[in-house]
Image: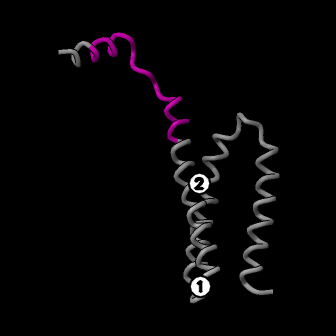
């Protein structure tokens, strides 16, 4: 079995397993799950970089590594954005008097 076919099998089986696992998660847990998935995506970024570094002159492996790196980076950035939004929901809102004062100062 060539390294390209092994990489494609890993991609296929990982995609099917991920689809099966994420499909069983209730919607209320998706945001905390995204926060934890950033560490796994970080490992995927390292694996993609390793694949690119070891691809040598094989353009198919370079392409597969680049695509996996793109998806992993997309997942990491999206995870951080979702986590930031989730944490903003738990921050304290300014009191009504402070908000009115700030609005009045901005109007001057």
**Secondary structure category for the residue under label 2:** helix
- Name the chief secondary structure element in magenta: helix
In front of the other: 29 or 67? 67
Q: Is residue 99 left or right of residue 33?
A: left
In front of the other: 82 or 60? 60
Q: Position of residue 106 (x, y in %)?
A: 23, 19
Q: Residue at x 55, y 42 (%)?
A: 83
**Secondary structure category for the residue under label 1:** helix
Q: Is residue 47 left or right of residue 105?
A: right
Which comes sooner in the sequence, label 2 or label 1? 1
Q: Work out which quarter of the rendered image holds the N terminus and state it.
A: bottom right
The residue that disc 2 covers is: 75
The residue that disc 1 covers is: 54
Residue 107: which quarter of the image? top left
Q: Is residue 70 magenta?
A: no
- Please determine whether, in this image, residue 72 is positioned above or below residue 35: below
In three-dimensional space, the C-alpha distance between marks 2 and 1, rounded to whole angstroms, equals 23 Å
């Amino acid at each position: 079995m060539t390294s390209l076919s092994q990489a494609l099998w890993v991609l296929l089986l990982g995609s099917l397993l991920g689809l099966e696992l994420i499909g069983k998660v209730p919607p209320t847990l998706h945001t905390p799950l995204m926060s934890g998935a950033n560490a796994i995506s970080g490992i995927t970024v390292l694996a993609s970089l390793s694949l690119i570094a070891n691809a040598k002159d094989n353009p198919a492996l370079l392409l597969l590594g680049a695509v996996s790196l793109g998806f992993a980076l997309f997942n990491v950035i999206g995870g951080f954005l979702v986590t930031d939004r989730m944490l903003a929901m738990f921050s304290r809102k300014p009191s009504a008097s402070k908000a009115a004062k700030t609005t009045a100062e901005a109007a001057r």
